[in-house]
Amino acid sequence: MDTGAADALLICEHCDTVYRRRILVRGEVARCARCAAELERHQSLSVNAMLALVLTAMIVFVQANMWPIVTLGLNGQFSATTLWGMIITMWQQQAQVVSVLAAFTLFFFPMTKMLVLGWLLWFARRGRRAPGFVRLMVGLHHLGPWTMSEVFVLGALVAIVKAHNYFDVVADPGIYAYAALTVLITIFAGVDLRQLWVLTRDGQA
Amino acid sequence: MNTLPRAADLGLIGCHVCGQVCKDATNAGLPDGDTLACPRCGSALHRRKPDSYSRTWALLIAAFILYIPANLLPIMRTASLNDIDDNTIISGVVELWVKGSPDLAVIVFTASIVVPMLKFFSLGMLLLSSRAGSDWARPQRAKLYRLVEFIGYWSMLDVFVVALLTALVRFSLLSRVEPLPGVIFFGLTVVLTMFASMSFDPRMIWDGRNSND
């Protein structure tokens, strides 16, 4: 399916310069000589390692969403919230736009991304393309920057500091789960998913 | 001055979705109106993103219009027994600086004020200079675009802060936090600027007049 000649070339997305592809060794990053954008980096994670990361992220994600994030205390009264508690409250407070934004960027998109990745990687372990491979890969690309869990973690930190002036603040397990999720996202940030196009072949489907 | 070959000159197109290098068959008898599709992932192929200038301008201007009420209107109300306090973005930063921690105030200030402003100025400047085919500071402009693209979504920070505080501070009469319209305008501004930077095609930075002639 791939013509060998096309695989040997590489085009810089940021300035359209054409390069001959070179095998990179561990730690190497290929940069464009014209615009200095990153062309490719050595992918040190195997498919199995990526799958393990995604599965871990799924478990942490479930915890981050189930458990309360922070508890506030004021004169013996307590108030806690989960992510969905926050989304629902915003809807009820006439900020439906914010509610929908949060629901998608913090819940639906991250969840979709993990499920799709898990599905694709599960098949990629044997070098196969999962059913729906092409469409899912295109979908993943378009999901792009619309997952914002790491921004939310920083936001929670700011909210805690702000609330700390007026309330007793207790960090709940949810915030730790979110912190762990951020670490996983950061590890995954260097992964170029486009390698799956090359690593897998049309076995069936 | 540059001898690095460019895809458009070699009759190649890089697929923006999957990275595949494709032959540009636009001039090879393709029926009018039909777009070229990537043989690997089926996405439409474009030498440059379609209508990049007008789309980016439209989104950028829309974002800027929404950014005005986002800053002028309060984003959050803090109500307690004897006091109602409405916060704008900037007063929230000031409060954090005075009462909380200056380091976080700097982060919020960067995310809510510096980043959106940087986006408006940078994208506007990139659009004007690329349109003019200017070869001024091209590597720096390319770098600026990548910076804008990378940090863009962190502006959502303040929106999440307001949302979380609203959900947390619910002590009936004693103390409540409510979102105010400013936060909605701000959320929309961030989304629109993200779309704007996505629709800008950084390859245009390098498409000077001299390379076409």
Image: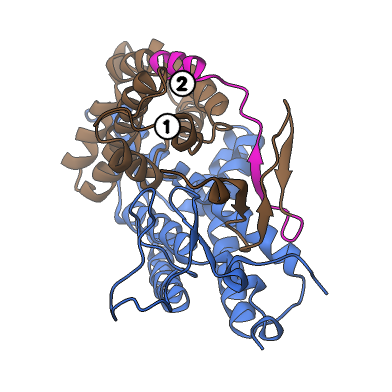
Chain colours: A brown, B blue
Image quarter (top left, top right, bottom left or bottom right) of the C terminus of chain A: top left
Observer-nearest of B46 and B76: B46
Q: Secondary structure at mark 1?
A: helix
Taking the magenta stretch, the answer to whether it contains residue A119 is: no
Observer-nearest of B171 and A171: A171
The residues tagged by marks 2 and 1 sit, at their Cα atoms, a distance apart of 8 Å
Observer-nearest of A86 and B15: B15
Residue type at tag 1: Ser
x 76%, y 76%: residue: B136
Residue A195: x and y in percent read 51, 35
x 48%, y 32%: residue: A150
Observer-nearest of B184 and B179: B184
Residue type at tag 2: Leu
Residue B8: x and y in percent read 57, 71
Q: Give the magenta-colored segment's residue range.
A: A33-56
Residue position for label 2: A181
Residue B26: x and y in percent read 42, 74
Q: Secondary structure at mark 2?
A: helix
**Circle number at residue A149:** 1
Disc 2 and disc 1 in contact, CB within 8 angstroms: yes
- Callout 2: 10 Å neighbours few (<14), some, many (20+)? many
Q: Is residue A71 above or below residue A88?
A: above
Q: Is residue A66 above or below residue B113?
A: above
